[in-house]
Each structure stands twice: as C-alpha cells, then as structure tokens.
Amino acid sequence: MIIKEDIIFKRSKKGKRAFNLPEQEDNSALFEKFSDEIKDFVSEEEPKLPELSEVDVIRHFIRLSNMNYNVDLGFYPLGSCTMKYNPKINEVVAALPGFRHIHPLQPDHTVQGALRLMYELSQFLAEISGMDSVTLEPAAGAHGELTGIKIIKKYHETRGEKRKYILVPDSAHGTNPASTTLAGYIAKTIKSNNLGMIDIKELEKNLNEEVAGLMVTNPNTLGIFEREIKEIAELVHKVGGLMYMDGANLNALLGYIRPGDIGFDVIHFNLHKTFSTPHGGGGPGSGPVGVKAFLKDFLPGLLIEKINEHYIRKETGKNSIGKVLAFFGHFAVMVKAYTYIRMIGKEHIKSVSENAVLNANYLKQLLKEAGYEIPYDSIPMHEFVATGAPIKKKYGIRTLDIAKRLLDYGVHAPTIYFPLIVSEALMIEPTETENIETLEYFAQVMKKILDEAATNPEIVKTAPHNTPVKRLNDVYAVKNLKVKYEESEE
Ligand SMILES: *Cc1c(COP(=O)(O)O)cnc(C)c1O
C-alpha cells in the first residue's frame, strides 16, 4: 500500500478540537497591566493553526511516519553514518523517571545516579579510546570536532605559539575541514596515495612549525585504516603539531585499537553512531571529546569527579576553552550509550568491531561478484566504496539512478557521490547489526539493478516507482524555499 499524506492544514476543519478546556475568563484587565513593550509583542490576530480532532492528528503523523524509510523498517547501508539497529532497551532506560524527570540545576546530592552515569560513561570512553579525560558536553560529532580543534588552538596559544594550519587528508569526512575553518585555522588538504591512505611524502612536504595539527578520519572515508599512523604521528609531533582523530567510525576499532595508543592526542566520539542512539534528521546526538592528560585543563564546561563514593560537578580550570553547550550536554543520549556499553560488556565489546568489519568485507566480496568495481580495493574496515563510473559509461545509468532504484526494492540507498576522491561513489556501510540474509538480499538487488541497466535502462533512470513520492527535483526546495503555509494555496 502506498500511503499519501498532505500537509496537516488540508485536514483542518473550523471548530474541530482534540481537547476540552474550561471557558476562558475575561483577562483584559490582566492585559492592561502589561508594559507597552510587552503589549507590542501581542498579536492582534488569532494564530493560524490547523483545527483537528485527536484521531486526525494521530493518523496524520502515523501516515507521515509510514511514508518514511527508517532503520527499524529495513537495511540502511548509508556509508559513514553507521545506521545500525538501536536496541529498544536504550529507550526504556532513558525513559526511567529518575532520568527523565531531573533538572540540570538540581543540587549534586539529588542527582547522584545521573552524575554517576556520566562519570562512568566518561571512564568507559577514556578506556575504550586510550585517552585520559573525556568531556561529554558537545552536542554531536561536528561539534566535538570544533571543541577538539579549539582545545588544540588554546594549547598552542598558551605556549605563546601562533600556528596557522590544520592538515586534513582528502579522504577525511567533510565536516573536518569545516570544523578547522570555523575554529580559525586554514585547512590544508593532504592527498591520498594510490592505496587510499595518507601519502607520507605529501605530508612531509606540508609539515612545518606553522602546522597546529593533523586531523585524521580513521578509518578514513574509504573505510581504510591508516596503517602508517604511528610514523605519521611521530612526524607531526616532531614539528610540535598535535594529532586529532575523528573517531566517528569507532565501530570499526572497538576493543582492538585504542587511538590514544597509536599517537593521537585528541579524539571525538559519535555516541549516536558507535554507541547506538537513533540519529539522522537532526539529532539529538552527542559528540564527547577525549584528550591526553596534558590537554585536560583545556576541556570545556564541567567535569564530574568522584570523591568518597560521592559524585560532584567541578568547573574546569582557567585554561578551559569555556562552555560549548548549555548545561551538561545531551543527557538522554548518554544514558542510551551507557546502556549499550553495559549491555555488551567489556569482554564482548570486540564483537562489535569484528562483526562490522566482517559484514563490510563479505558484502564487498558479494558486490564484486555481482559486477561492481571497487577502486581502492584493499581489506576494508567497517565500510567500503564502490564506483558506478563504468556503469555510467556503458549504460548511461548514474549512481543516483542506482540509489533511487534500490528504494523500489525496499532498501535505503548507500551514501552517494562521497567521498569525492571516487567518481560516481557508492559508499556502503552495512554495520554490525545486519545478518547474512540481509547482506545477501542487498547484493542480489544490486545485481538485479545491474541487469536492468543492460536490459531495461529506462526503469532504472526513472526510479523510484514504488515509493510515496517519485523522483524528486533535488534542488527545487533549496531554490524555492518556502516554509510558510498560505491558505490561498490549494
Ligand atoms: C557522522 C560523522 C561526522 C559528523 O558527526 P555529526 O554527529 O553528524 O555532526 C564526522 N566524522 C565522521 C567520520 C562521521 O561519520
């Protein structure tokens, strides 16, 4: 069944209500007491809200949710985004009244459980990453990057050094150069070698005393682990630069490699990817930042300390970069990540990365057998990148067409046209929570689409056909942005 649903205003009928309130008293006397400044803000017109009954409202939103693809519905191999299944126990724990009904301004002794959870989560993340201190404050991955780069900047500044550049490999996540720029540095691109790893010669050419640090997505966006990272870290440290790791892809390394042991000084985590919180469509996420001991003083906001079985919030020192978010970060996400880590346990945390890597390698092999080309074809970690370039050349079918056709078979599309170093890129991350049947189904569908490209290219070029909306004009909304509903529009 294809469900269609229009905007809620179209269901509106004058006088319909989903609630009953007592008659309103005459409050004009109260209004007169307001100052003129406040009166200026009061609208003379009634707000133009849709009028509906409860059942109308529920059906509207349920229908909308059914028009949407989601990770609880099926396979979602969106490269880099780690769209793994999020266990529902996380939601149960996050909704416990003791977590849900507390306020950030409550005194420490009334929120000991919450503080303990934050304290222990920081400890887990420090142990997992090989770092010494962790702040839970940043709101998401990119926000963690900005926080981490600001820490690096403050570190150099307190040493009286003005450095200009952060080096960023061309295989980095797109947010990396953006965050460095926002923090006031110039992002300088380092080219990859033909194995898809940082080219050490290129790196050496760009290393000097003006370099504040190197920011590495590891594994990088090709899903490849930077094998020469220890040597790279030595080179960067030699000129006084620091090593930043974008740890959003930590599901590839959990339990096997600790970034702090291989030369990194700063890392951010994506709790909403690696540690299973629903994400996409804007959050909320959580992007904690871990640092080595010599950078602890620069951490933002508050840290939790444990003194005689008692947990307290403590301001960071005078070198702190200052707060990066109101209060203490996104607490509910922390509860979910904590639950996930405790549920898996220290002994089994390795199984996360083992399954992530096994699934990616198996799926890569299946796609190769199905006829897809993998340009940087080494052993990938948690994801790999195929190219649709030969298919485009042979049949005029673009990667975008393949992505759209996948929707007809009930599968979410992979990330496409990223990373930029692969033309017609299909960036595929199966994640650790998928079973073998799902991987094989996906490979079968990909093969089928390739067959269609040869025998019936039109059906691929005009896909999707089975979805609530068909092929959309991707840029129309951007070029004709309209967020207000006008009643005259029918
Ligand atoms: C998702 C991701 C980010 C950004 O994280 P957000 O939470 O979306 O801001 C950064 N780096 C990598 C490698 C990522 O996959």
Image (cartoon, helix red, strand yellow):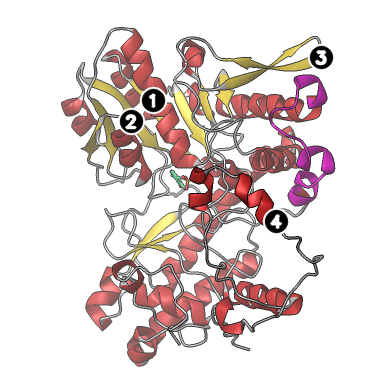
Q: Amino acid at mark 4?
A: Asn
Q: CA distance from mark 3 to mark 1?
A: 33 Å
- Quote the CA–CA distance across marks 2 and 4: 50 Å
Q: Which residue is mark 1?
A: 150
Give whichever of discs 2 and 1 has the lower sequence position: 1
Badge 3: residue crowd in 10 Å (few <14, some 14–19, many ≥20): few
Please name the residue shown 28% across and 35% down the image. 181
Find residue 428 and report its horizontal and vertical position in percent: 46, 60
407 relative to 107, above or below: below
Residue 230 showing in the rendered view = no
Residue where numbered disc 3 is placed: 309
Residues marked 2 and 1 touching at CB (< 8 Å):
yes
Residue 95 numbered tag: none
Q: Separation of disc 2 and disc 3 at Cα?
A: 38 Å
Percent coordinates x, y for residue 468 in the rendering: 53, 83
Q: Label 4 belongs to which residue? A: 27
Disc nearer the start of the sequence (1/4):
4
The magenta segment is 90-111
**In the rendered structure, which disc, 2 or 3, sits on the residue that comes first in sequence?**
2
Q: Could you tell me how far apart the alpha carbons at marks 1 and 4 are, in whole angstroms? A: 51 Å
Residue under label 2, please give it: 183
